[in-house]
Amino acid sequence: MNCVSCNEPMITLELDGVEVDHCLSCAGVWLDSGELELLTRQPDASRVIDKALEDGRRGSGTRRCPICRKKMDCVMIGSNHEIEIDRCTRNHGIWFDRGELEQIAALLDDRKQSAVADLLRRTFNETAEKG
């Protein structure tokens, strides 16, 4: 699969039993549908994204889903709408730019420095530095 952001080939990492597509060039992360819930151990993790969409918190997205090639929704999440992620309109998955997945994990854990957020931060910061 090629990166949603920079079109470079992505690698697949297994992180806590979940296959995660990661771009070594820009440090973006693609999660297939349901993987956010598995990684964060939050069964309703995608509900945060759904709620933001319902509330009209959309950005001006231009990225396309790597699976269906349809334009994705750009969703603004967080108390100040500081996290901008892209979600496939056909529910194939979610794109996170560098650092956004860790921010979402922390947000889902009420902004505490959870073990999951820490694991994500360490994993992706290390692979980004090596890439």
Image: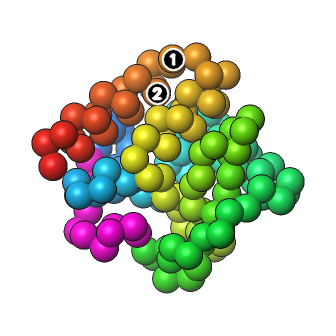
- Residue range in magenta is 2-13
Residue that mark 1 sits on? 113
Chief SS of the magenta region: loop
> Which quarter of the figure has residue 17?
top left
Q: Which residue lies furthest to the right in this view?
A: 55
For residue 128, side relative to residue 58 (left or right): left
Q: Please name the residue shown 49% across and 82% down the image.
A: 69
Q: Name the residue under label 2.
A: 117
> What residue is shown at x 37% (from left), y 31% (from top)?
121
Q: How far apart are marks 1 and 2 (CA)?
A: 6 Å
Give percent across and percent down for residue 127.
21, 41
Q: Can residue 64 be seen in this view?
A: yes
Identified at 51% across, 17% down, the residue is 113
How many marks do you count on the picture? 2
Packing grade of label 1 (10 A; few <14, some 14-19, many >=20) is some
> Which amino acid lies under the numbered mark 2 shown in the image of this protein?
Ala
- Above or below: residue 3 compared with residue 30: below
Q: Are marks 1 and 2 in contact (CB under 8 Å)?
A: yes
Q: How is the image coloured?
A: rainbow
Check disc 1 and report its element: helix, strand or loop.
loop
- Residue 79: image quadrant is top right
